Image: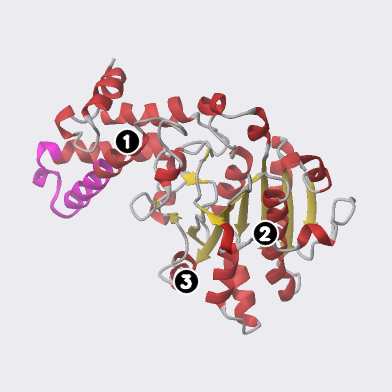
Amino acid sequence: MLEHTTLMLGRVFNGRGEPIDGGASLPEENLKTRMNYSLRDIPSGFVHTGISAIDGLNPIVHGQRMPVFSANGLPHNRLAAQIARQAVLSSEDNKSNKSDKENEAFAVVFAAVGVSFEEASFFMEDFCKAGVLERMILYINMTDDPVAERINTPRLALAAAEYLAFECGMHVVAILTDLTAYCEALRETAACIPTSLSAMYERAGRLKEKEGSITQIPIFTMPEGDKPLPGLAGYAAEGQLALSRAMHHKGIYPPVDVLPSMSRLRDKGIGKENTREDHADLINQLFSAYARGKEAQELATTLGNNALSEEDKMFAAFSGAFEDKYIRQGEYENRALEEGTLDAGWELLTMLPVRELKRVRGDYVDKFFFRAIT
């Protein structure tokens, strides 16, 4: 049914589902709920975003719910746009494992909720300039639109995603930003926020005997120190990405806070068949070394560098290089999985002695670590 997607892809609608691109309205048949919860299947398969902080450390799986927790003033909309531009069904390195039909059956549904005119213009211009609008559906709800429309916008977007996924057999990434505006609209109408968020999350996943999937990336912004919505928004998700103001102040983009971020379904999307056999071990080693380095940096801040052992200093240096060379990347930089992310991780590990690589198996050390040294 891929030929039926021509009416939907490359289209722009307002928060009521009305076309604002001069095209035809969508049939009501395309906007009904199709998620059959009794047929839910296990998420699997790797979504390649070209962003090392995601692909290398917190891999996203087809059918996963992966919220992004941010704060006002952080570049979550830039990150959302980058994911929308760069996301593909599989990495370039592994496209040979996929059929042409599978590689083509991919779409992005993007819902901008409660955005300003400047933000809406940024999304439209960015996607048009990148040439990715033809594989997308945009729903744009403005700040001055009615509250009821703000509630309907993500629901309409997910209905369109369900049609593409479960009627057309496509793998869909649904990016919903900013759902804090959605939650505030629910509060204004006295609706139950936990129930509404749970119902929205349930519209992600895979179904048995269906080829498609819906991967949700909802974005929430919260005032500093105020975390009630992430508490409600995160309990049903299979991971989270946390953005850090401290990283942002360092000039690091994307400012992903590595330690609280996680992907609980990562093992369903990585490994030899999806990415590379060393991927899981590499994640564990990078995370462990970075965490130890951050502890050493905090100790140096409190007691001074003289309080650090030589090993502590090595890990502190690793932590700084990890942020600067691995997490930091250009807003329009689309990194290849193997060379740009996995091999780069091994190269950073060469800053440490081989005896400290306790989270990776020996044959991977022989194959990848010593290759990185040379």
Residue at 63% in and 33% down: 103
Residue identifier under label 2: 158
- Can residue 14 be seen here? The reply is no
Q: Secondary structure at mark 1?
A: helix
Viewer-nearest residue: 156 or 334: 156
Specify the quadrant that holds the C terminus: top left
Picture disc at residue 232: 3
Q: Tell me if residue 203 can be seen.
A: yes
Could you tell me the amino acid type at mark 2? Leu
Q: Is residue 299 left or right of residue 350?
A: left
Q: Residue at x 72, y 41 (%)?
A: 135
Quadrant assignment, res 34: bottom right
The spot of residue 67 in percent (x, y) is 50, 58
Measure the C-alpha gap from mark 2 to mark 3.
Answer: 20 Å
Total marks shown come to: 3
User: Badge 2, how many Cα within 10 Å: few under 14, some, many 20+?
Assistant: many
Q: Which amino acid is tagged 3?
A: Leu
Q: How is the image coloured?
A: secondary structure
**Is residue 149 found left or right of 73 in the rendered image?**
right
User: What residue did someone put label 1 on?
Assistant: 282
Q: Write down the region rendered in magenta.
A: 289-311
What SS does tag 2 mark?
A: helix
Mark 2 or mark 3, whichever is nearer to me: 2
In the image, what residue occupies the spot 47% across and 65% down? Answer: 236
